[in-house]
Image: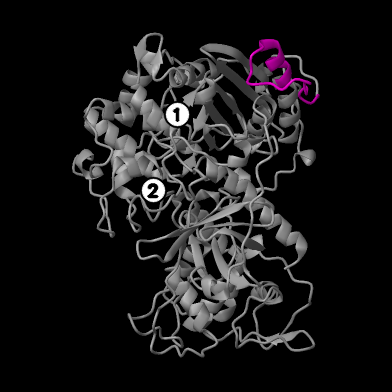
Amino acid sequence: MRNTKKWIHKNRAVLLLTVLVLTGTVINACTQVGNASNAPQTHPPVTSEVTSLKAPQDAKQLEGPLDTKELETFADGIFADAMKKYNTVGSNFAVVSNGKVLLSKGYGYADRENKIPVDSSTVFQIGSVTKQFTALAAMQLVDKGKIDLHHDIQEYLGGMKVPNKTGKKLTMYDLLTYTSGFDKPDILSGSKPEYVKQFYPMKEALEANMPTIVRPPGEAYTYDNFGFTLAGYAVGQVAGTSYAQYMEDNIFKPLGMNSTNVRFKPELLSKMAAHYDPKGKLIPLEGFIPTDRPSGGMVSNADDMVKYLMMHLNKGTYKGKQILSAKSIDQMHTYQVFPDKDYPVTTIGFEGYFKEKMNGQHVVIKGGNVTGHSSLIVLLPEKNTAFYMSYNNDSMMSLDVYEEFMNHYYPRKEAAPKPSYSAISEQQAKDYVGLYQNTRLGSMRTLVSYSNGKLVTETGDLGKSTLKMIHPLLFEDESGNKVAFQKNGAGKITYFYYMALPHYVGYAQKLNMNAKFTDVPAGSKYASYIQNLHALKIMDGKTATRFNPNGTLTQGEFSALLIHAHGWESMPDTIEPNKKQMLSGVPNYNSNSPITREMAAVMIQNLRQAEPGSKKVTLRGESDAWAVKAITTLVSQGIMDPDTKINPDGSINFRSKQLLKRQEASALLDLAFDYYTLPIAKR
């Protein structure tokens, strides 16, 4: 593959995965390469005079934000640079420390077209920061003895059934720590403008889209939107009211959060910031299914969020009102899930990504993105300090601000000690070697192999990394990113957690490659492709023991396999756009007719969107004109079955008119989608 294409796929994946880490929502804007230098620039900030200067570096080392004027000067410089870098139209920023609001300031425009500035009353969608509120609601019911974190969640669902293949109960604790084990954690992550004015009940949405528990709950971290929606539903069931009403009565009203809600109330819409994509284009507000979304549906503003942050820092109390017990607050601030003892992932409701940015401090964060809005809350409980920010595009700007804030106010006092490494023997490496699949993003798979005393990972277009062993379950790549492996009770490696984008969104599970098909000889050129697709649960055998490698497929059967291989079938809003794209330019599609090789090539290329390779390929034999470009492009990238060979002169007989065999389909799909795919943007 050409370097340009590789770079594009790397950067598009990083942009999308950053959003997925922070929110779990499908953000079509983030499928674009975010080069703000070519995008229309926003107007200067209106609510403050800002110059494009770097944050001041004082000779004396700071220990937290103490001086309001210094903090404002720091924030002005950081936001001037960050908003320019990410082409952000408007943002707010609020900092609380030691029971006081040190700063609450707006930058840029809430509505660029109407010249309305951002201020502390500007309402933003806060995306997955909502999860933190849902966790707090559940913990309130724990305080009241109405929920036990470790009881079967079925006790709290009012009769709703959750399919479970593991034999281990699912608990509220599992839901709130992202360890539910669901096979489709994003099945309720869609959003569309038309959903804004329609009401979709939570119960019906859950029952119509119920995933299955396929991994023992509590075993593996996976960023989980469905799990938090189910937790919110349980809150309403236990409290005897709706989730929305519970949140208003027990959190928003007691805290005086008058501009915060889980619904788009008219008075809040009138104060809401406009939405923009990463290029600065105005885009519409999108609603959700269900309408009340415990995983990411809230709106709020800086005036309200500072109250919430102060409650957290004051052990659950705000202005004399006990919102949550000190014990439960401590649980929410204490890390619960560790892929390695020194590397935390989640608390109850908060997260701890990017440990290297914490500078040795105890930090808990929660970010959120929806289409056109982003938010982040950062708490340092031991320093009695926190900040909140929202802005009106879905970009990585919040992470830049977080890093600058930590480096300025809580710089690392001493360099982190460099680890020592040990060689791993080829015999030891056998436990690790194999194919792994990300538990959230099924289309992202990683091959782990061995080379010269080290492990090597390869994740499609993201390329290879070499891992040096720190200890038998912790490794480090060339960039210093840690990779923690997990063993099961029998001592077998079952997962790894790669602490780098785009892997952050979940553990990767080692796949069982022991399928035994009696009609696929071990020496078959197709055996590895068939094994891979079977292990990935993309393509099963015709029976438990027979694959029928020379059998054919209907166009409908191949379409279903292709959508599954592409990896986005678990996100309902992407299915129809992907199907439409898949069939673009395909004449006379009939789901019941057998599929030819040339039709399969066009459908694959419509989703793969590969670029032609450097070597020119010409076709011999008969091929329809509408299929030629797709065939030659795929072949030039090496996406062809092992019985198809390129001649020295660059010519090839693709056997376009022949019916596609099942073994050929396995090879084409495995080769085409052995990389991180991106969804077709919603039209």
Res 462 visible: yes
The x, y position of residue 52, in whole percent, is: 80, 24
Residue 298 numbered mark, or none:
1
The answer to which quarter of the image holds residue 188 is top left
Where does the N terminus fall, quadrant-wise?
A: bottom right
Q: How is the image coloured?
A: one colour
Exactly how many numbered labels are in the figure?
2
Residue range corresponding to the magenta coloring: 53-74
The x, y position of residue 652, in whole percent, is: 70, 86
Would you place residue 263 above or below residue 429 in this image? above
Would you place residue 470 above or below residue 589 in this image? above
The residue that appears at 63% across and 46% down in the rendered structure is 15
Report which residue position mark 2 lands on. 179
Q: Secondary structure at mark 1?
A: strand
Q: Amino acid at mark 1?
A: Met
Side of 383 relative to 134 (left or right): right
The x, y position of residue 209, in whole percent, is: 34, 50
